[in-house]
Amino acid sequence: MNIFLNFDFYGAGNIGDDLMLDGFTGSFRSGSEKIFCTVPRDSSCQNFRFPSVDFIDRSKRYSIAKSCPVWIGVGDTPVQTKSGDWFLMKLERDVENLSTTNSKWFMLGVGAESEAVSRKERYSRVLSHALRVWTRDEQSHDLLVNSFGMDPSKVKASADLANISLCGIFRNVNHSKIRKFSLGLCYYDENAGTESIGNITKFLRSISAQKKRSVFFANDVNEKGMFEHGLYGRIIPRGMRILPGRIRFFSPDYFSRTPLEKLVSHFSDYETVMTSRYHALLTAAWAGCKVISLERSSKVTALSRALGIAEVKKPYSLNDLTDAFEAARPVDREILNSMYMKARESIKELELAVTGPGSHSFKTSREEF
């Protein structure tokens, strides 16, 4: 049996996407002949990191997809509008093609944001085609059922697939190790306000004045667009880049044959991580850093609650940032281990749905969960 991964954002420069895909490919055992995926970009770095996936040319997307009896949407937040309607429109095209086949569609380790309720009717039509969905948190589960009208027997709350990859990478964290930098900051916001940016700048000045070393790092390495690289230029004035005690910028070498563990190894250099990025937050927690969440969207807020950490609300006043920094602490390892176990269990349940007894009938009764 061939399997088609119908999400196509992998390899775009966001390290979190690789962590989720690695969690899936490293654990999923389907007995399939091949796992196919198409991405609208150079896939050489993905071919290196994920040899079990056959990345094919985007021109063959639907011809290959229609030949696969199982489709799986792996990871990320397909039910979202913070970054526009691109994901929704892609899903609408997919289900249009799915309806011409006998293929079964599952989603695994996915998120839903409350902001997407503004597209409720369109998302509800799309989601009705999914046979089963495992969400990456309780909030996403509740949204899909209560706000988007999904059948509760088709949805189960689980955990983000990146937990599987991160558990392996940061299995042995040395909490007694002296870390190189007091602070690692990773900031991104689809709507980064001037006041928020100004307050982050003030906070970083105060950190520098205390002779604490800081790094502004990227989770999405793209230099085009207002991602971390662009925001670094807005937040860090020229003087703070060239003077002693400067706030340096670090971007992992993503678009190369760099192993995934090396893309996140720099987290071990930070005593505290402050971030608005979902997977930077999760990675920092697994790396044993003290962790602070910066409010950005409902998915980040949900994760900060699940991790039991403080979230600084916009517009990030200097006092709030300072207080959070001084009170920051590592995440309880038991919380992380629980997330890992839930993510692993979701993959086992998917395996059973795809290949186990009764797989041809694809039953959806609540008892199977």
Image (spheres, rainbow, N blue to C red):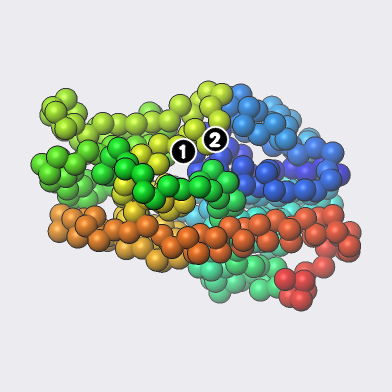
Q: Please provide percent x and percent y for residue 113.
A: 48, 60
Nearest the eye: 240 or 36:
240
Quickly name the residue at label 1. 264
Query: Residue at the front extreme?
Result: 176
Query: Judging from the image, what secondary structure is the residue with disc 2 in?
Result: helix
Quickly name the residue at label 2. 260
- Please give left or right for residue 314 compared with residue 285 in the image: left
**Going 84% across and 39% down the picture, which residue do you hit?**
33
Q: Please provide percent x and percent y for residue 360.
A: 89, 59
Q: How many marks?
A: 2
Q: Amino acid at mark 1?
A: Val
Q: Circle 2: is it few (<14), some (14-19), or many (20+) Cα within 10 Å?
A: some
Q: Please provide percent x and percent y for residue 37.
A: 69, 37
- Please give left or right for residue 206 compared with residue 58 in the image: left
Q: Amino acid at mark 2?
A: Leu
Give how far apart the Cα atoms at labels 1 and 2 are.
7 Å
Is 15 above or below relative to 91?
Answer: above
**Going 54% across and 35% down the picture, which residue do you hit?**
260
**Going 59% across and 51% down the picture, which residue do you hit?**
164
Q: Quadrant of residue 220?
A: top left
Whether pointer 1 and pointer 2 mark residues with C-beta atoms closer than 8 Å, the reply is yes
Is 325 above or below relative to 242?
Answer: below
